[in-house]
Amino acid sequence: MFASVDEVREALAGEGYIADERLATTVFLQTRLDKPLLIEGPAGVGKTELAKALAAASGRRLLRLQCYEGQDETKALYEWDYGKQLLYTQILREKIGQIVSDAADLEEAVDRIGAQESVFFSDRFLAPRPLLEAVRSPEPVVLLIDEIDRADEALEAVLLELLGEYQVSVPEIGTFVAEHAPYVILTSNNTRDLAAALKRRCLHLFLDYPAAERELEIVRSKNTGLTDALAAQLVDIVRGLRELELRKAPSISETIDWARTLAVLGVDELSARVLSDTVSVVVKYDKDVRKSLDALPRLVDPNANVPERHPHPHGHGHDHGHDHGHDHDHDHDHGDDGPAARLAKDQPGRFTDGYYGTPKKTEQKSATATLGRRRAL
């Protein structure tokens, strides 16, 4: 058990996890109060990594339950090994015959077999899953329930007994109570609200993107190979990208990946060009990439003179250099009343022969004459 908040920070730092005062205090209280810890916040801010670092720092084994939609209690708590039960039944078929061989009637035979039912629903055939395994473990563990917001609400109800009393009830056998209270960490990306009953049983911490100084400290601690000066500049640029209201903001782990990418390329100066070529390391959606490309020159140099890019009216995203065979210039009206301008141009006979591949009138006349001569012959 940790003796102080400072000891928690030092222990986590020894495992490569840089914690601020608030986070270290919460973890210290968790270990002293034996309360589960629910951490909410955006993806990629270090929620899962905290559980891994805590397990390593405390010398405990890490058990992980990765939540997903449609998950039920059999994948989280326990299930019966039906295949093993069936095999056991086949092996004992002869023995069962001996048990009922001297039964006076069918009722007595059924009673004798019923007395053996507990054999098939015993610890021998119980297959524990992470939640039950954490309770039954003979040694202290850290239990990570990752992305609980992705699971159905029914799983939250299953968790209440474990989170409140560190025990799991198996109807066929009884109740298992933890010999050593596990350190339980639940994470949520806030894709939905969690039940009040679940939150009431947990300490709560909202983990947001860190301050610039702490994020720089995290990047430096990972030995990315990027110089401290460039790492500091890169952290400022990533923080600028997060202010663009992207569909997915760059995470801390992606900042580290970007730093390693630039180090591998041997970059000794952060320019808009090299950052644009590698921005997909931290930005994962096409619209986000376009926003980022527009913003990068100013993030690199706030005094940069960058001309505004106007989207093409057709939305092709490239210069419109197609030749449609028009006799008139292919220009567009950029006025405010677009529909009225298009209606004014819609005049009969405004298209020339051959427009968009249609046959010209001279070609039609020639083809008709040729067909007439063939019929006369």
Image (tube, rainbow, N blue to C red):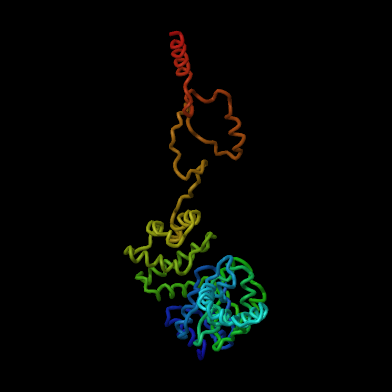
Q: Quick one: quadrant of the C terminus?
A: top left
The residue sitting at the bottom extreme is: 3
State the image coordinates of residue 375 (x, y, percent, origin top left): 46, 11
288 vs 368: above or below: below
Residue at the spot 57% in from the left edge and 38% down from the top edge: 335
The mark tally for this picture is 0
State the image coordinates of residue 28 (x, y, percent, origin top left): 54, 85
Q: Is residue 47 visible?
A: no
Residue at the spot 45% in from the left edge and 8% down from the top edge: 376
The answer to which of 106 and 307 lies nearer the viewer is 106
State the image coordinates of residue 37 (x, y, percent, origin top left): 57, 79
The residue sitting at the left extreme is: 266
The answer to which of 254 and 213 lies nearer the viewer is 254
State the image coordinates of residue 139 (x, y, percent, origin top left): 49, 87
Q: Is residue 375 visible?
A: yes
The residue sitting at the top extreme is: 376
The answer to which of 25 and 65 lies nearer the viewer is 65
Left or right position of 198 against 356: right
